Image (cartoon, rainbow, N blue to C red):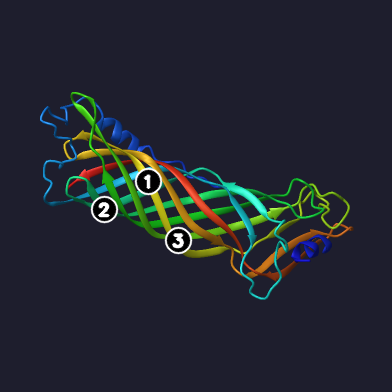
């Protein structure tokens, strides 16, 4: 029957606002100044004119990121009880939008190709979900916090320039990459504030305390891949502003095999806490991001 029947019978949020530094720098660089694209067709990519050499560059950027949604289900069987016990029982939710900070070092390979090694960090992406255990009511909120770091090797192809005006051109690009995602999932708690029977095993405490189940943390490293596209805008000699979209498949995130902590309240109001070993739980993680990156040709 799975652990969900046993759970019924045994009767915060952080966020990190993005720094405005990069936005301020980009705005200052976009201020009126000498045009980058001259009449001879040079683009400010530094370097479209020099197609034979390998020209290095560095980047720093920020991105607004959001997940496609996440559904936690039973993971691999390690010989313990399954938390959900059925394919029809799960924790369905999403991670709140957040921000990543990215840095990269790359090299231009001729006039249209470039490659870069990039590293990014996203902290405190807050998960908000809802479980659907039987007899626990329609409202079964869950929460967790996900910290991510990612490293990718990315290749780009830059298409011929689009001319916006006599002194401004943009370069559309597409890219793809592969790498690793390192994650830590913590603070995973499932609460039961409104059970079908408020006087049953999921009753509240004498002071209105809500019964809950705390799930083990998870930490691991996954192989990942990404696709990206956008435009490069020359803004000063040797500077470009890259604007675009990025899709990332970060693989499967897992809670570790270990003890869950189950907190319930007896009829007389006393608190009861026990621990039960369970198998891991898991969810797919895909993210969508809109990014802004400053690129400096060395």
Q: Position of residue 140 (x, y in %)?
A: 73, 49
Task: Say which label, 1 or 2, has the lower sequence index.
Answer: 2
Badge 1 is on which residue? 228
The answer to whether residue 36 is left or right of residue 86 is left
Task: Give residue 182's mark.
Answer: 3
Q: Position of residue 55 (x, y in %)?
A: 16, 50
In front of the other: 10 or 176: 176
Quarter of the image with the N terminus is bottom right
Is the C-beta separation of discs 1 and 2 under 8 Å?
no
The answer to whether residue 79 is left or right of residue 162 is right
Is the C-beta separation of discs 3 and 2 under 8 Å?
no
Task: Give the spatial CA distance, label 3 vs label 1.
Answer: 20 Å
* Residue drawn at point x = 70 percent, y = 59 percent: 87
Q: Secondary structure at mark 3?
A: strand
Q: Secondary structure at mark 1?
A: strand
Task: Say which label, 3 or 1, has the lower sequence index.
Answer: 3
Residue 13, visible in the rendered structure: no
Task: Give the spatial CA distance, label 1 vs label 2.
Answer: 13 Å
Badge 2 is on which residue? 115
């Amino acid at each position: 029957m799975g652990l969900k029947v046993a759970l019924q019978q045994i009767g915060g949020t952080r966020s990190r606002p993005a720094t405005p530094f990069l936005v301020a720098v980009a705005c200052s660089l976009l201020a009126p100044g000498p045009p980058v694209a001259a009449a001879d067709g040079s683009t400010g990519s530094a370097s479209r004119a020099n197609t034979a050499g390998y020209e290095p560059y560095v980047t720093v950027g920020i991105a607004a990121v959001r997940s496609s949604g996440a559904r936690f289900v039973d993971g691999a069987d390690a010989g313990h009880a399954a938390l959900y016990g059925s394919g029809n029982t799960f924790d369905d939710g999403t991670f709140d939008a957040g921000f990543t900070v990215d840095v990269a070092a790359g090299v231009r390979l001729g006039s249209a190709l470039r490659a870069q090694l990039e590293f990014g960090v996203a902290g405190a992406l807050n998960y908000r979900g809802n479980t659907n255990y039987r007899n626990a009511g329609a409202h079964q909120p869950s929460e967790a916090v996900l910290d991510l770091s990612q490293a990718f090797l990315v290749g780009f192809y830059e298409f011929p320039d689009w001319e916006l005006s006599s002194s401004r051109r943009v370069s559309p690009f597409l890219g793809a990459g592969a790498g690793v995602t390192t994650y830590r999932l913590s603070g995973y708690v499932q609460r039961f504030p409104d059970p079908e029977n408020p006087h049953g095993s999921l009753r509240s405490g004498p002071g209105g305390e809500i019964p809950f189940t705390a799930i083990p943390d998870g930490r691991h490293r996954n192989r990942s891949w990404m696709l990206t596209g956008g435009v490069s805008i020359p803004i000063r000699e040797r500077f470009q502003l890259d604007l675009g979209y990025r899709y990332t498949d970060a693989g499967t995130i897992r809670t570790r095999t270990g003890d869950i902590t189950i907190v319930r309240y007896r009829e007389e109001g006393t608190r009861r806490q026990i621990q039960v070993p369970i198998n891991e739980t898991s969810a797919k993680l895909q993210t969508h991001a809109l990014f802004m990156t400053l690129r400096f040709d060395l």
